[in-house]
């Protein structure tokens, strides 16, 4: 009987050890790499699927400044320079205000009476409204008044894109039909400097342009940006660049999209919004 009792006790002891070890193993966390723990903790979203949903080729680059992290689709295209089109209105507005070509954002310029394809362009307007409507003729007038030499000087000081604005005869279209070119990556760097006030313009000028750039403003975030439509290439290319301030952070973005008809235009903004939502942003709206 004693032998039997000892045997039973021994079996129970062994079974307890085995059970404990099994529980210990099950309780261990999944293995992680000690070299790149942060990278494993963050899964980059598939931003390319938004372009596929619209059936269009393009690219997007989002820079999370607080965490120094880049999210992008089509890196090669993000490093390829093209004409900035109407995204250049950001730069043009800075120079016009700084040189006094327009003293502020509400002084009105008279429409020249030439009927253009977009109805919103066919009336007198000011810097703020022309930025919102992307009124080409208004900013062409500003460029002519700034003049070739002063424009080239500011382009060089800022180091904007490839710094090429052609000849004096190109002063009112060098950003629309080239030779000026800029990459999405360079757009991000320019916007960072604008946000930080690290540009050769007065604080008043910078603050005014930042205010003009506001597209959406809620208690949770502020979205600034500018669209552009490059029509001198085949296929035509749409731009949307800007930055989002949310959660005490700043997210800079630059989106390009191949466009074939006017109905493609909203996709530039929608793809950008969906991509920002992938990062947990703009979640409370739409």
Image: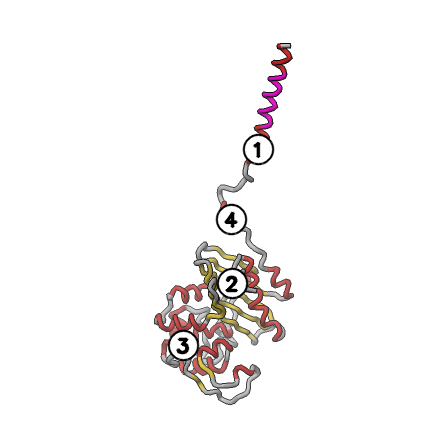
Q: Is residue 75 visible?
A: no
Which of the marked residues, 2 or 1, is nearer the chain's N terminus? 1
For disc 1, the neighbor class at 10 Å (few under 14, some 14 to 19, many from 20) is: few
Q: Nearer the viewer, residue 255 or 211?
A: 211
Q: Secondary structure at mark 1?
A: helix
State the residue position of label 1.
Answer: 25
- Mark 2 secondary-structure assignment: loop
Front tag of 4 and 1: 1
Q: Which residue is mark 3?
A: 151
Q: Which residue is mark 2?
A: 79
Considering only vertical position in the picture, is 243 above or below 134? above
Asked if the residues shown at circle 3 and circle 1 are in contact, with their CB atoms under 8 angstroms apart, the answer is no
Q: Nearer the viewer, residue 248 or 56?
A: 248
Q: Position of residue 188 (x, y in %)?
A: 47, 64
Q: CA distance from mark 4 to mark 2?
A: 23 Å
**Residue 109: which disc?**
none
- Across and down, in percent, residue 88 comes to 47, 73
Disc 2: CA contacts within 10 A as few (<14), some (14-19) or many (>=20): few
Cα distance in 3D space between marks 3 and 1: 69 Å
- Tell me if residue 16 is in the magenta stretch: yes
Please give left or right for residue 104 compared with residue 237 in the image.
Answer: left
In the shown orientation, is residue 201 left or right of residue 250? Answer: left
Tell which circle, 3 or 1, labels the residue nearer the N-terminal end. Answer: 1
What residue do we see at 51% from left, 60% from top? Answer: 62
For the residues labelled 3 and 4, the Cα–Cα distance comes to 43 Å
């Amino acid at each position: 009987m004693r032998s039997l009792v000892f045997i039973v006790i021994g079996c129970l002891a062994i079974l307890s050890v085995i059970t404990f070890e099994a529980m210990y193993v099950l309780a261990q966390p999944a293995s992680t790499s000690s070299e790149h723990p942060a990278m494993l903790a963050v899964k980059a979203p598939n931003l390319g699927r938004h372009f596929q949903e619209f059936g269009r080729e393009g690219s997007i680059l989002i820079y999370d400044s607080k965490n120094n992290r880049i999210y992008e689709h089509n890196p090669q295209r993000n490093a390829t320079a093209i004409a900035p089109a109407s995204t250049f209105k950001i730069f043009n507005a800075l120079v016009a205000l700084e040189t006094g070509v327009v003293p502020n954002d509400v002084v009105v310029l008279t429409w020249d009476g030439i009927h253009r394809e977009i109805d919103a362009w066919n009336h007198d307007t000011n810097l703020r409204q022309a930025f919102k409507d992307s009124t080409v003729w208004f900013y062409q007038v500003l460029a002519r008044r700034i003049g070739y030499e002063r424009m080239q000087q500011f382009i060089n000081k800022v180091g904007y894109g490839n710094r090429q604005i052609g000849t004096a005869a190109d002063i009112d279209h060098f950003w629309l039909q080239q030779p000026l070119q800029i990459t999405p990556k360079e757009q991000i760097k320019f916007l960072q400097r604008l946000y930080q006030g690290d540009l050769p313009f007065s604080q008043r000028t910078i603050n005014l342009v930042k205010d003009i750039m506001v597209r959406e403003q809620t208690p949770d975030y502020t979205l600034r940006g500018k669209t552009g439509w490059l029509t001198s290439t085949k296929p035509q290319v749409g731009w949307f660049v800007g930055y989002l301030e949310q959660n005490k952070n700043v997210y800079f973005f630059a989106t390009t999209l191949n466009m074939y008809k006017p109905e493609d235009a909203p996709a530039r903004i929608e793809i950008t919004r969906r991509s920002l939502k992938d990062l947990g942003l703009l979640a409370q709206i739409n």
